[in-house]
Amino acid sequence: MDNSQSTSKTLHDERDRYLDSGKSFIDDEAIERLLKAHSGPETAHVRDIIAKSLSLARLDPAETAALLHVTDDALWGEMFAAAAEVKNRVYGPRIVTFAPLYCSNLCVNSCLYCGFRREDKEMVRRVLSEEEIRRETEALVANGHKRLVLAFGEHPSTGVDYMARAVRTVYDVKVDKGEIRRANLNAAPQTIAGMKTLGEVGIGTYQVFQETYHHDTYARVHPRGPKSDYNWRLYALHRAQEAGVDDVAIGALFGLYDWRFEVLGLLYHAIDLEKRFNGVGPHTISFPRLQPAASAPLTNEDNPYRVNDDDFKKLITVIRLSVPYTGMIVTAREPAHIRRAAMNLGCTQTDASSRIGLASYSDQAYEQQENRQQFHLGDTRGLDEVTREFAEMGFLTSFCTAGYRCGRTGECFMNMAKSGKVHEFCIPNAIFTMKEYLIDYASAETQASGDNLIMQKVDGLPDKMREKVRAKLKDIEKGQRDIRF
């Protein structure tokens, strides 16, 4: 057997090893039947479902389908309030921040919604060198960031070895008291061996978004390239878990197909991961909306599946209620007012001061140039302004990565999240890392708002915890950094 045959056999085996009698966990017809069967749910039934979610139990698909068909505005109001309460019970009043760092935009795929698609001849193609990655990271650290999501196009020149070098480069950067403490990856699906290589360099969460769970739509919008293989992508995170990368993230691109179907697809994905890996489902769920992108035909067409703002808030709410213990990410694709709404509906993470053109942190002349980025951003506000806004909303801005570095990942994290105990560690660590940011990077106005919020949150802590936190805050004021609870 030659190398090409061996590689082909590995890919085939790793794609199909998780199938059940040759079928995946996504059954389009069954999902459509489920949605139809649970239209027009009774109010009492919906309230029972809400109560189950408030107990932090994951909903089943039938219960989620019922929530997706609520039409009464008052009942939606109850669901909005419950979503906020669920998030607070698990994660507390904190929002984790990060920044995206695009390392390459070479791509061999032909996705109809993406500015990186290989047919786009106007795109300025680029692969950042290690020195360029270093400069980008230095700019982000100087801005106050502690965690990044590294993003890559799918191309042979930016495979696992390149990704591993990029991660090492990011972790090597130190700027005064600042550093990146966690580098997550948004990248193409890998083999189990490839995932082991990435795990060895200390990647954080590994993100692979299915984009759409609807098979016919998936085939239509991914006409050519490796990404056209539905099952290879669908089981990317199963392979990551098998390789020992136990923090994984799922997502769908809303606007490709019916949003209710996609919410159920995300739920089925979470259920299958939990079933196969000791209850360890996705660490986070993302739900980006389709945005305009240069030379991407689908973004410029009349599209019956575009998700309006009202429905977007509803799908966020249903995801939060369906998987109450999982983190949820809303990104700078969305305008500021939508991101504010998302924070009040249970989202736990967002990006700030984001630039998605390659090399656009170190050279801001590239900001929002169509031929240099994957799509348009809706909110390009800086980290300082976002931190101040969150403080005014009552949310701590958390730069914490302590849990990951202390081993609270995978099964350990899930057990804590499902029991509602994550906030016992995360709130003190959010306070510490926000205080670091306020001292080292914030404007006077943001520092005043942030310090006021920190005092409020510390005063509300249990007695024993309160005194420990106050002592550690004094250590931070004296210059100590990376203090963990």
Image: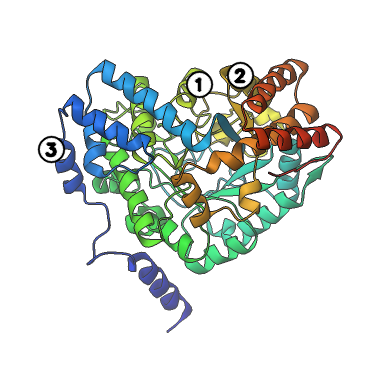
- The numbered dot on residue 45 is none
Q: Residue at x 80, y 45 (%)?
A: 174
Q: Residue at x 32, y 22 (%)?
A: 78
Q: Answer above or below: position of 478 versus 198.
A: above
Per the image, label 1 sits on a secondary structure element best described as helix
Q: Nearer the viewer, residue 76 or 132?
A: 76
Category of crowding for the residue at label 3, using alpha-carbon neighbours closer than 10 angstroms: few (below 14), some (14–19), many (at least 20): few
Residue at the farthest front position: 463
Category of crowding for the residue at label 2, using alpha-carbon neighbours closer than 10 angstroms: few (below 14), some (14–19), many (at least 20): some
Amino acid carrying mark 3 in the image: Ala
**Between marks 3 and 2, how big is the CA–CA gap?**
42 Å
Q: Residue under circle 2?
A: 389
Q: Are marks 2 and 1 in contact (CB under 8 Å)?
A: yes
Q: Position of residue 372 (x, y in %)?
A: 58, 36
Per the image, label 2 sits on a secondary structure element best described as helix
Q: Tell me the quadrant of the picture where the N terminus can be found.
A: bottom left
Q: Nearer the viewer, residue 467 or 53?
A: 467
Q: Quadrant of residue 31?
A: top left
Q: Residue under circle 1?
A: 340
Q: Position of residue 138 (x, y in %)?
A: 76, 40
Per the image, label 3 sits on a secondary structure element best described as helix
Total count of labels: 3
Amino acid carrying mark 1 in the image: Arg
Q: Residue under circle 3?
A: 37
Q: Tell me the quadrant of the picture where the C terminus can be found.
A: top right
Q: Position of residue 367 (x, y in %)?
A: 63, 28
Q: Position of residue 177 (x, y in %)?
A: 82, 40
Q: Answer above or below: position of 1 versus 256.
A: below
Amino acid carrying mark 2 in the image: Glu
